[in-house]
Amino acid sequence: MTTIRLDDRLLALRGQVREWGADFRTLGLALDRDPELIREHFDLPAVRYLSTMGIPPEYGNVPIPIAGNRFYGTLALERAIIMEELSCADVGMLVASPGPLLAGVLIDLLADEQQKDWFYGRMLESPLWTFFALTEPDRGSDAGALSTTVVPATGDKPALLSGAKRYVGNAARAQLGVVFARTSPGPLGINAVLVESPSPGFHAEALETIGLRGARISAITMQDVEIAPERFLGRHLSPSRRGMWAFVQTFNLLRPGVAAIALGIARAAHEYVITHRSALRRDERDRLDLLARRIDGARRLVHLAAAAVDARTGDGYLASAAKVRAAELAHDATQQACTFFGAGARLEHPVLDKLVRDARGMEFIEGTGNMQKLNLFQGLFTGKLDRDDPFRTAPLAG
Amino acid sequence: MTTLAHTDQWSRCHRAARTDGVAPAVTELAVAVLPGLLPCGPAGHAIVSEEIAAGTSRVWADGVTVDRSACAETALGEIDLPGGPVLLQRHRAPGGVNGFAPAQRAAWTLGLVWLRLGLSEELRETAMRYLNGRRTGNSTLLQQQMVKSTVADGLIEHLEVRAVLTGIGPGELPDTVLNHLHAQLTQADRALVKLLGASGYLAGGPGQVARVSELLAEAYCRPEEWL
């Protein structure tokens, strides 16, 4: 019988990324004060790795070998392991790092060969930030209601993209991104287009946030941004496969990674207490042990959820469960960690304060806890989540 | 390493808890891992089916086996449940007994978490059926968002417990982790029972099953201060 234990290959990946994380930990607070500091650290191994993570080998990606293996980050389980380790080191550095992440997953699902060559080629030339623009002001991530439009080309007039997006990571400094927009009403009218920045009519600016400041969460406005025909993603696919279907699959694939980020924050809080508190009382040890058990339990769920989406991208219900659980855990763990340091803990321990602030962001990223729960319920109610064997599609479950 | 035989045992016990009830599931587990023995917890408490109570001449006291006749036996009660009654007993074993069998204990304690997981999952299904049959306005109670959220919270707890148990063999999880899993299941049960309203308060119904499930943890888990 197989188990959910990681094999030697994945353990080596975890060990290496954990080692890389030491740089992130050192720079975390400084980056929190100045998110642009990341520009001075493109040479760090973790930043270099993230800058091409997710690019398949056939497009020329040659990541640093780890224990004789190359990890392309094309699997959700690999990404979950990497994200937990780097987030545990410093989530700000992780989300500040350039790379194809969200947009890359969508490209992998949706783009034709020419589009992949172009996008991956750009990403391999030099570290670039990318963005994934779905959420809109006043509408959140309700894709059915999105109102950004792309007016199709007519005659010699190019297609024009107009509208506004909000809460988009790294958009203010990105060179490439994906924007979801409508060509017509209804779910089949949603398209994803590739956009370069700067482009005439495209403007993005960073929003000041409480935490996760490395992400440069941004607001975008677009007014008649010209979109060439070859920038319509999935132009070789039917409309039903390139709009809502595509971003649902993308989110399914990414959600275990988001859960792993939250898990990493929880672990960082736990490790902070262990490192900075000596001579724990019995009740304190018990509380800390309980936290460790909760972290271990959540990790198992995250890994099974990742294995499930790797096996079948439509199987995102476990990932919803994992994301809710890990986000709640990050919230609890960071708050609890403060109680080990007496009055004014957050004022005296800037790292703890940062962990608390960062953890709060995990509640809404990639869908709020309430939305995830509704999704999970729907999976249960409709029978899409197997009630008898919920890990059936997760190969690690055996 | 988990053996196929063990996996089958947990699977049968888990399934029996979901489909047949507490007593058949306890019988299934006891017969599989403690054949011929009456399973008791660290303080001598037992919650068993009539079949196990009547068909065993030796007592298994948290890892140590003694003749039943050597124990002081007290009946603490009987609870009627779907699938048959369970008997609550105390068996005081004489002191100074040797022969602790860790493998048996590891199998029983792990199986008990699978059993309670099955009971808790069935409670979730029962609550969903119940609320799907009750209407408010143009919809069912089950389709109310607060209800959906509570169901999802219970399901998340079940999934995490199952994730921790999956692929694990007897003795691989320490008692502290097993106790934590029991606490998660108790928390899930208490939240899910609330969905049943007053009907969850009736003896013989799903609320009672949840209560007995808690008692199983109470009887068979070593207290944290022992660990």
Image (tube, coloured by chain):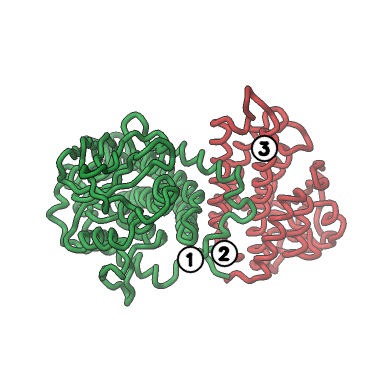
Residue A340 percent coordinates (x, y): 35, 42
Q: Are marks 2 and 3 on the same chain?
A: yes
* Kind of element beneath mark 3: helix
Circle 2: residue type: Gly
Q: Residues within 10 Å of mark 3 (few under 14, many from 20)?
A: many
CA distance for labels 1 and 2? 8 Å
Residue in the image at 40% along x and 38% along y: A143
Is B150 on the left or on the right of B59, as rendered?
left
Residue B152 percent coordinates (x, y): 55, 41
Q: Given the current orientation, which residue lies at the most extreme left position?
A: A40
Residue topped by disc 1: A5
Residue A56 percent coordinates (x, y): 32, 66
Q: Which mark is residue A199?
A: none
Residue topped by disc 2: B167
Does residue A338 show up? no
CB-based contact (under 8 Å), mark 1 and mark 2: yes
| Figure chain in green | A
Quarter assignment of residue A150? top left
Is A96 on the left or on the right of B189, as rendered?
left
Q: Are marks 3 and 1 on the same chain?
A: no
Residue in the image at 32% along x and 38% along y: A342
| Figure chain in red | B
Circle 1: residue type: Arg
Residue A366 percent coordinates (x, y): 38, 44
CA distance for labels 2 and 3? 29 Å
Between A393 and A201, the one lying in front of the other is: A201
Mark 3 or 1: in front is 3
Residue topped by disc 3: B127
Between A382 and B206, the one lying in front of the other is: A382
Circle 3: residue type: Ala
